[in-house]
Image (cartoon, rainbow, N blue to C red):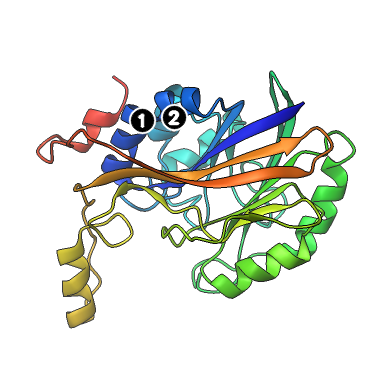
Amino acid sequence: MSIRVLYVGEVVGKAGVFTVKKLLAKARQEHRADLVIGNADSATGGAGLGRQHAVYLRKLGLEVITTGECAYYKRDIVDFLPQAPYVLRPANYPYGNPGRGHRIFSCPAGKVAVIQLLGQAGFPRVHLANPYQAIVDIARKLREETPVIILDFHAATTAEKRTMVFHADGLVSAIIGSHTKAITADAKVSRAGTAYITDAGRTGSLLSVGGLDADTRIKEYITGIPAWSKDGSRELELQGCLVEIGDDGRALSIQALRIPCDEVLDEKQPASAELPS
């Protein structure tokens, strides 16, 4: 018997939420997923996850929602995290912070442990504990209850992610990279039975810079003046991966996914249009 886990690449802005709404249910059915995980670190306004979006994305089918360096960017999520066991923030935040960094989730096919860790490079506003030390202790503890362990490693550099692949090889079932929002072509299962992909990409606009409006980003790079980009809205796609794991915790396969959305987002709709009433 095996467990099939569908991972949705980072949901970016209103376009990303719209894409999840239109595509996720069908994707889950077609790929016969037992559990759906999705990163939503940029779901609200392109930076962070608000409470309403957390609730809404869960209703749309994300059973486990991971975050990243923007975990605490939205004020309303801080108090909500203890009430939302399906939302994970990086486990290497200080002990006692709101929320949790790992949890075991039950699905019809069995138990799946999900861990979120944040890398150390490229995050000037966040300085967390060493993720390479943390993964060993956390994985060993979780293995007492289930051998099926998924790590969402939210890191800014390929070097950090590749290092984690070698470091945690055989310790976890799958290592899925997030944050850079550009899907990579290296999905593979190691000889030790760990599936990995350097980055699972993003869900939202492809004609954009990381899901955000390209013109605004161009202006920011030319002038050096920080600009708050609006969401991109053209050429929508759900990216991610599908991982199949045996009941012994060894990965059997990993497949990168790119699912285009034929429907067009109405750019005139307010951001609240994709929130529950």
Left or right: residue 3 versus residue 58 is right
Q: Amino acid at mark 1?
A: Leu
What is the distance, in whole Å, between disc 2 and disc 1 at their CAs?
A: 6 Å
Residue 66 location (% of width, % of height): 55, 44
Q: Is residue 194 above or below residue 107?
A: below
Q: Considering depth in this image, is 99 or 275 the residue closer to the camera?
A: 275
Q: Are marks 2 and 1 in contact (CB under 8 Å)?
A: yes
Mark 1 = which residue? Answer: 23
The residue at 32%/44% (across/down) is: 237
Give me the residue at 20% from left, 63% from top. 214
The residue positioned farthest toward the right in the image shown: 144
Left or right: residue 48 compared with residue 112: left
Question: Residue at coordinates 19% horizontally, 48% vertically from top-left?
Answer: 234
Q: Amino acid at mark 2?
A: Ala
Is residue 79 shown left or right of residue 222?
A: right
Residue 55 vertical position relative to residue 6 in the rendered view, above or below? above
The total number of labels drawn is 2
Quarter of the figure with the C terminus? top left
Say few, some or many: other residues with alpha carbon within 10 Å of mark 1 (under 14 / 14 to 19 / 20 or more). Answer: some
At which x and y percent is residue 22? 31, 28
Q: Would you place residue 266 above or below residue 211 in this image?
A: above
Residue under pointer 2: 27
Q: Secondary structure at mark 1?
A: helix
